[in-house]
Amino acid sequence: MKLDHYKTLVFDCDGVVLDSNRAKTRAFYTVALPYGEKAARALADYHVANGGISRYKKFEYFLTQILGRYAPGERELKRLLDAFADEVWRGVLGCEVADGLAALREKTSATRWLIVSGGDQEELRRLFEKRNLSHYFDGGIFGSPDSKELILKREIVRGSIKKPAVFLGDTRYDHQAATDAGLDFIFVSGWSEFADGLKYCRRNGLSCVGSLRELAG
């Protein structure tokens, strides 16, 4: 698959650049477990079914819909988010980096790269510095609390994303956000937790690769 004509490559993080999906699913379950196994499983299932959406919205859903609270208290929400951040940090420090990332960067040396993730922005930037990955993404590393739709539209206006551009993601939400912003889309299946991802790609005529190595050639 040729990427030569793209001016910008936009990457999701979890499941695309890092094999971190399972670590985050475990973290949602672990943090919610004090509320009971049923509630913890419901949150983990909701997270998997809504891959790419920020943790802020997921914990608000947990408190209001799963636990049935009228409105989430700020203190309780912050406590859950802080506990989740601690769990995630331990999980992602050692997770695998996509094979072929360096080769793909070399192959697309004239192309701008960005991360647009549902993960916490400051956490992502700290993690990418620690894992020596930041230098690949000359267009910036962006995440929640801003949504992917907001980030993509904002960075297009700023000129950080120049078209033609393509989004490399592993969820339905990634595809929807890319389409809304006028970007092409490539589904990266190898680490995705989107159970019907390949069927979704066939149904929508989307390009699909197993890993970034396939794009690096």
Image (tube, rainbow, N blue to C red):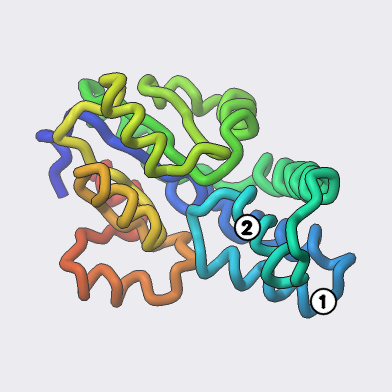
Per the image, label 2 sits on a secondary structure element best described as: helix
Residue at 86% x, 69% y is 35
Circle 1: residue type: Glu
Instruction: Measuring from the top left, give residue 217's x and y in whole percent.
Output: 23, 45
The residue identified by callout 1 is 37
Residue at 21% x, 21% y is 110
Circle 2: residue type: Lys
Q: Is residue 46 visible?
A: yes
Inter-mark Cα distance, 1 to 2:
17 Å
Depth order, front residue of 79/6 = 79
Closer to the observer: label 1 or label 2? 2
Dividing the picture into quadrants, the one containing residue 176 is bottom left
Q: Is residue 90 visible?
A: no
Question: Is the C-beta separation of discs 1 and 2 under 8 Å?
Answer: no
Depth order, front residue of 24/176 = 176
Depth order, front residue of 147/175 = 147
Q: Is residue 156 above or below residue 176?
A: above
Residue projecting furthest to the right: 34
Dividing the picture into quadrants, the one containing residue 2 is top left
Residue at 72% x, 75% y is 41
Dot 1 or dot 2: first in sequence order is 1
Q: Is residue 177 above or below residue 202?
A: above
Residue projecting furthest to the left: 5
Instruction: Measuring from the top left, give residue 137's x and y in whole percent.
Output: 40, 26
Residue at 29% x, 44% y is 167
Instruction: Measuring from the top left, give residue 81's x and y in whole percent.
Output: 75, 46
Left or right of 191? Residue 25 is: right
The residue identified by callout 2 is 58
